[in-house]
Image (cartoon, rainbow, N blue to C red):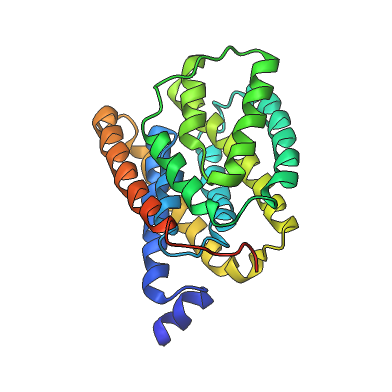
């Protein structure tokens, strides 16, 4: 039946849609295991299938579901005092980004995504931060501002939070809360620039569903895999895909939101 009406009216062809549905599950599993990395990996793959006009906004919508599933899985272990302060800072960063993002040359979007993914793959294991209100506010504002241009900042969030000595479950769940807040703000910012989420809604809903499956699987695999070896493989995969994306970005000149 026309491959289920081209996979329930996805704006992409059937092969690309199936690829993204599978990757949404796989990358959600990665994030559930490590607390980060899956969103960035999904972003760079999406960059090869979705035009830069919609890439960051669609990715943000999909990650809403992935982060929500991790919040539910680790709902009893969240560091709520940290997230409240962080999200207040995130709101400040989003408001500033709204004034800046529309002024940048759109051709820089893919380059910014590729470069940030490359940097994220090789971030130090911990960015020095104390659990003080001012530092958490600053982290929320800075990371959220950056997310409007590079898409996924999960590895940067993880690097910041590794210095706070959270348990593994608190680490994963708290990052998810912070990233969910960022993605909500990102959707509002790009919506104010003219992005229409409704044409992407069928694909987003399907990817959120497969993302839930991936999170469920990742939560059950936690502690059963060699996370250090798995993280190293992820790092090199991100590096290779980011280099490919950077090479392609130099050839693209795509206007933002028409």
* Residue 105 relative to residue 237: left or right: right
**Residue 113 placed where, x, y %?**
48, 47
Quarter in which the C terminus is drawn: bottom right
Q: Quadrant of the N terminus?
A: bottom left
Residue shown at 43% from the left, 24% from the top: 168
Picture coordinates of residue 45 (x, y %)?
A: 39, 55
Q: Is residue 16 left or right of residue 11?
A: left
Q: Is residue 35 above or below residue 164?
A: below
5 left or right of 93?
left
Q: Position of residue 96 (x, y in %)?
A: 74, 39
In the image, 70 versus 35, the foreground residue is 35
Residue 28 vertical position relative to residue 208 in the rendered view, above or below: above
| Image quadrant assignment for residue 142 | top right
Can residue 215 be seen from the camera position used here? no
Q: Residue at x 40, y 23 (%)?
A: 124
Report the front residue among 189 and 178.
189
Total labels: the figure holds 0
What residue do we see at 51% from left, 40% from top? 70
Depth check, front residue: 185 or 212: 185
Residue, far bottom: 1
Q: 76 above or below 209?
A: above
- Image position, residue 178 (x, y; %): 60, 34
Residue at image point 62% right, 62% down: 256
**Image position of 94 (left or right of 24):** right
127, above or below 247, in the image: above
Q: Is residue 194 visible?
A: yes
């Amino acid at each position: 039946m026309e491959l289920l009406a081209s996979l329930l009216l996805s704006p992409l062809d059937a092969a690309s849609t199936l690829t993204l549905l599978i990757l949404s599950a796989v990358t959600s599993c990665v994030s559930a295991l490590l607390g980060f990395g899956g969103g960035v990996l999904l972003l760079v793959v999406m960059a090869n299938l979705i035009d830069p006009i919609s890439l960051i906004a669609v990715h943000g919508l999909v990650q809403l579901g992935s982060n929500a599933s991790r919040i539910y899985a680790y709902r009893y272990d969240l560091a709520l005092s940290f997230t409240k302060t962080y999200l207040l800072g995130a709101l400040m960063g989003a408001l500033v980004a709204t004034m800046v993002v529309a002024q940048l040359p759109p051709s820089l979007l893919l380059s910014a995504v590729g470069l940030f993914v490359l940097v994220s793959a090789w971030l130090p294991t911990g960015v020095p931060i104390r659990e003080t209100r001012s530092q958490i506010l600053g982290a929320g504002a800075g990371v959220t501002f950056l997310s409007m241009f590079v898409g996924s900042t999960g590895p940067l969030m993880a690097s910041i939070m590794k210095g706070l000595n959270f348990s593994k479950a608190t680490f994963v769940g708290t990052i998810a809360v912070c990233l969910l807040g960022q993605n909500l703000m990102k959707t509002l910012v790009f919506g104010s620039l003219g992005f229409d989420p409704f044409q992407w809604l069928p694909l987003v809903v399907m990817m959120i569903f497969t993302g839930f499956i991936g999170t469920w699987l990742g939560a059950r695999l936690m502690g059963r895999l060699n996370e250090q070896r798995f993280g190293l493989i992820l790092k090199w995969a991100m590096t290779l895909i980011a280099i490919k994306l950077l090479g392609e970005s130099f050839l693209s000149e795509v206007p933002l939101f028409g």
